[in-house]
Image (spheres, grey):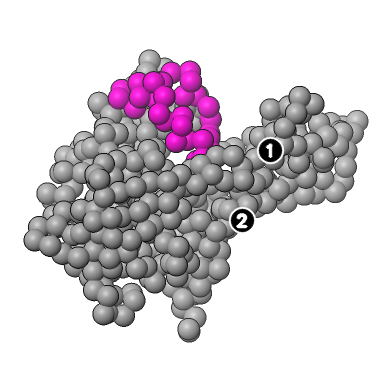
Amino acid sequence: MSQEAFREEVRDFIESNCPEAMRLGAVHFEDAYEIYQSDAANEWRDAAAARGWTAPAWPTEYGGGGLARDELRVWQEELIRVKALPPSNGMGLTMIGPTLLEYGTEEQKQRHIPRIVTGEAQWCQGYSEPGAGSDLAGLQTKAVLDGDNFVLNGQKIWTSGAQHANWMFALVRTDPTAPKHDGISFVLLSMEQPGVTVKPIKLISGSSPFCETFFDDAIASREDLIGELNKGWTVGKRLLQFERNAGAPPRSKKKKRLNAYAAIAKQYTGEDANGKIADAGAREKVLDQVIQENAMALTTRRVLAESKASGAPGAATSIFKLVGSTLAKEGSQLKSELRGTAGLAWEGGDFSDDELESTRAWLRDRAVTVYGGTNEVQLNIIAKRVLGLPD
């Protein structure tokens, strides 16, 4: 099939199956959990899953779409054209799925990956603990092998979407006598069992995307050990590379990026006779932000193209996390700053929905340089793994 014929097929499919309620362009991850629980989201996901297009580039033998690189690009372009959200999202697609494709046994792939494609399995991540955040290797959640099962006791925190998930991938300590980077194993476990308790954490922004998760003799099957016993640190690090790659900024046209900031600047600071942002300082800040965002987007596209030819991206994904999270935080800061005092609004009928959302977005995005690995951790990884600097 020619590329143009495939484009027409994709366009017809999206027009016929993507509800208007799912044509939102983009959503913040904190809002995505609720959006993807809707009937419209389920309708869109089920239609795409029937063709494997929830995971369009994954192998067909596991339920994926098996699309070639050019076909995948067409699919993504057509979604963007009508501002359609991806038919499915979450850690199954961006994190544990790619990790299973690389590290899982054939039986593990056959058992778990098709359920990610259909959306039957919704995943969360059991990494951080109250005493093991940036120093993740200091984790203390214990898993004791008992016959065909691991028995888990301990606590995880900042577990994104745990209240919506029915499966977790987790790093647990299986040999407490080993050095902290050793003796860790990577396991999968059901969230729907008596030994798992989830408590959402309410944030200052008003949402609760993160949770505390407690294990009290929770069970993980030995057949759901990914990789070797006590060698889970290697698997866990690889998954983080997939996570950081998935967090790269979406592709969007330069003009659209510019217009988003310029429209706010003109509304609150005015425009001159030529239709430009009137305030020179605001104009300079908008241009600098847009240049940096587009440079990041172009770099991301280049590195992703290279990685598809040579394998999954490596430690360089920490650059995406470092720069992308910093730009996201600075972008929210700039939008609030351009609005002046209206950019600090919290409630009241004198403020628009956009102004109220701007404040919440500013609060949310203060955290992006912390979760998923702090900027300090990313700088260390870049120094050691990318630049090869000595410890």
Q: Name the residue under label 1.
A: 358
Q: Which circle, 1 or 2, is nearer the viewer?
A: 1
Q: Mark 2 points at which residue?
A: 326
Q: Residue furthest right?
A: 273
Q: Is mark 2 on a helix, strand or loop?
A: helix
Magenta residues: mostly which secondary structure? Answer: helix
Q: Give the range drawn in magenta.
A: 19-47
Q: Which residue lies furthest to the top in this view?
A: 16
* Along the line of sight, the residue nearer the viewer: 125 or 44: 125
Q: How far apart are marks 1 and 2 (CA)?
A: 17 Å
* Along the line of sight, the residue nearer the viewer: 100 or 157: 157
x and y percentages locating residue 145 in the rendered image: 15, 64
291 magenta-colored? no
> Image quadrant for the N terminus?
top left
Q: What element carries label 1?
A: helix
x and y percentages locating residue 96 in the rendered image: 31, 50
Circle number at residue 294: none
Query: To which quarter of the image does residue 48 belong?
Result: top left
217 horizontally vs 364: left or right? left
